[in-house]
Image (cartoon, helix red, strand yellow):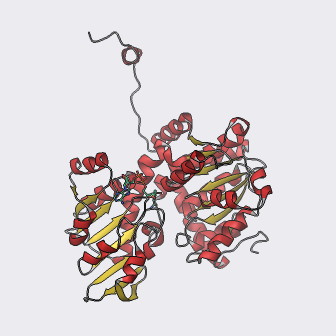
């Protein structure tokens, strides 16, 4: 118990540093801040309890404060054992009265204890980054849990995939809004946010020079293309591996070399996985890597690298720097695994810059309001973020950046909406 609210955090004395950093992030989140001001007046979430399983960062803190100001009772836990910023967790409890259950480096049991702790708060809305809360609710033996919930929001690609698969099997028991799929989310957060912060995480962990390196990017989705373009900008030679022919073609025409991982792993200085899938780098790839290769994952789960396979071919490992483990292979080669194969941008750096999370979390806040207003009309399906919300977030962000754009004249609009011109 901290501040008389239920919580489990590392150290309450870190609160003052956390508060400074939360306020610094807020400077770069003007869209969320406008929503916060409106929420504070209108209280659209009055009486609603929201359980968030998100990366506990400065940006998430600003989202939690916005929801709280909208009248919600907010409880937070971590969506990854390594992504919590302990000073932020402390400040949320001490300065903002938000129940937070998250400790950086928590073990598997603590991770699930914390998920259960937020569910003990009897949420009406679940807010996930990776669908762990929904999964815990649906597998719980407590029927009251489900009866309180009227909706949920999902932040990331991997979570949306899991939830759509539950819905297809008819096992989703409440409506979910796929925040990830909003244009103002994945076009920007996944591409520019993951692009920048993944390189930031690897740089902080290793202090390596990107110029001149051969960098292999596995997966050319929204995240992968962001990482590839930024690595190119830093002077790396980028190789992309893909399983989708269209995405592979895009990578090739964006100027990257494209080849199977079997070949890429032999020449890589650095390999980064962002596939959302399983074992993009497997034992056979580790077997042929160059001495000194650096391997990191920035996809949601730590399953993109076959770490068991790496352990099998290694005769020892040691931590040589924070977040860097050196694996020694029988023939003397060394391979460096970063951040235990977990999201490197959150493990070794601070996650996405606030300016991009501004749009993602504006979508989260407005989607929660939408769920509260429309709960009676929604089915147990995965919904897109309503277009009006997506467009409004884009409009507000442009405005905040001081960018004006043209509007169609009546004549132009008529032309674009008619079939009988141009003959
Ligand atoms: P996406 O679906 O747009 O792209 C994934 C790409 O990987 C696809 O083009 C797919 O064909 C390719 N792929 C799948 N298996 C592969 C394999 N074995 N080898 C090579 N390519 C393969 O997904 P998006 O939005 O780029 O997300 C990727 C992952 O990153 C997800 O797990 C997502 O949840 C996570 N993510 C992580 C963030 C972070 O902060 N690090 C932020 C946002 C998303």
Q: Position of residue 343 (x, y in %)?
A: 45, 67
Q: Position of residue 232 (x, y in %)?
A: 24, 59
Placement of 353 over or under 296, stated as above or below: above
Quarter of the image where the C terminus is located: top left
Q: Position of residue 93 (x, y in %)?
A: 69, 68
Residue at 59% across, 75% down: 108
Residue at 56% across, 36% down: 386
- Along the horizontal axis of the image, is 250 left or right of 118? left
Quarter of the image where the N terminus is located: bottom right
Placement of 418 over or under 136, stated as above or below: above
Q: Could you say which is closer to the camera, residue 413 or residue 418? A: 418
Q: Can the viewer see residue 98? A: no
Report which quarter residue 100 is drawn in: bottom right
Report which quarter residue 398 is drawn in: top left
Q: Could you say which is closer to the camera, residue 282 or residue 43? A: 282
Q: Can the viewer see residue 24? A: yes
Q: Could you say which is closer to the camera, residue 260 or residue 198? A: 260
Placement of 328 over or under 159, stated as above or below: below
Q: Residue furthest front?
A: 169
Image quarter for ligand 1: bottom left
- Along the horizontal axis of the image, is 81 left or right of 412? right
Q: Position of residue 240 (x, y in %)?
A: 27, 58
Q: How many marks?
A: 0
Residue at 26% across, 85% down: 333
Report which quarter residue 340 is drawn in: bottom left
Residue at 35% across, 70% down: 282
């Amino acid at each position: 118990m901290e501040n008389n609210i239920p919580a489990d955090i590392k150290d309450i004395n870190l609160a003052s540093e956390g508060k400074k950093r939360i306020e610094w992030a807020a400077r770069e989140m003007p869209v969320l801040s406008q929503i916060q001001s409106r929420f504070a007046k209108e209280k659209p979430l009055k009486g609603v309890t929201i359980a968030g399983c998100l990366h506990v960062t400065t940006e998430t803190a600003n989202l939690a404060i916005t929801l709280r100001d909208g009248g919600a009772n907010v409880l937070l836990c971590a969506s990854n054992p390594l992504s919590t910023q302990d000073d932020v967790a402390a400040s949320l409890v001490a300065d903002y009265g938000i129940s937070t259950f998250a400790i950086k480096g928590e073990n598997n049991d603590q991770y699930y204890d914390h998920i259960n702790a937020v569910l003990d708060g009897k949420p009406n809305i679940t807010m996930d980054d990776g669908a762990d809360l929904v999964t815990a609710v649906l597998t719980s033996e407590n029927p009251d849990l489900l009866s309180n919930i009227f909706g949920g929001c999902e932040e990331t690609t991997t979570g949306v995939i899991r939830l759509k698969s539950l819905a297809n099997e008819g096992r989703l028991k409440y409506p979910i809004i796929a925040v990830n799929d909003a244009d103002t989310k994945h076009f920007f957060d996944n591409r520019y946010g993951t692009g920048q912060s993944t390189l930031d995480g690897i740089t902080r962990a290793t202090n390596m020079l990107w110029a001149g390196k051969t960098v292999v990017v596995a997966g050319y989705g929204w995240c992968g293309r962001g990482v590839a373009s930024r690595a190119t900008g830093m002077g790396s030679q980028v190789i992309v591996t893909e399983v989708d022919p269209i995405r592979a073609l895009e990578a090739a025409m964006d100027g990257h070399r494209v080849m199977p991982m079997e070949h890429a792993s032999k020449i890589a200085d650095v390999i980064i996985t962002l596939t959302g899938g399983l074992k993009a780098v497997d034992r056979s790839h580790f077997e042929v890597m160059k001495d000194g290769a650096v391997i990191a994952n920035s996809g949601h789960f730590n399953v993109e690298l076959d770490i068991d396979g790496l352990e099998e071919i290694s005769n020892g490992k040691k931590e040589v720097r924070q977040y860097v483990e050196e694996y020694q292979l029988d023939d003397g080669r060394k391979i460096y695994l970063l951040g235990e194969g977990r999201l490197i941008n959150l493990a070794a750096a601070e996650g996405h810059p606030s300016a991009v999370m501004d749009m993602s979390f504006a979508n989260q806040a407005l989607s929660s309001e939408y769920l509260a207003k429309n709960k009676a009309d929604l089915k147990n399906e995965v919904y897109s973020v309503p277009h009006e919300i997506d467009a409004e977030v884009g409009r507000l962000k442009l405005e905040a950046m001081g960018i004006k754009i043209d509007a169609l004249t009546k004549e132009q609009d008529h032309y674009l909406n008619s079939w009988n011109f141009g003959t």
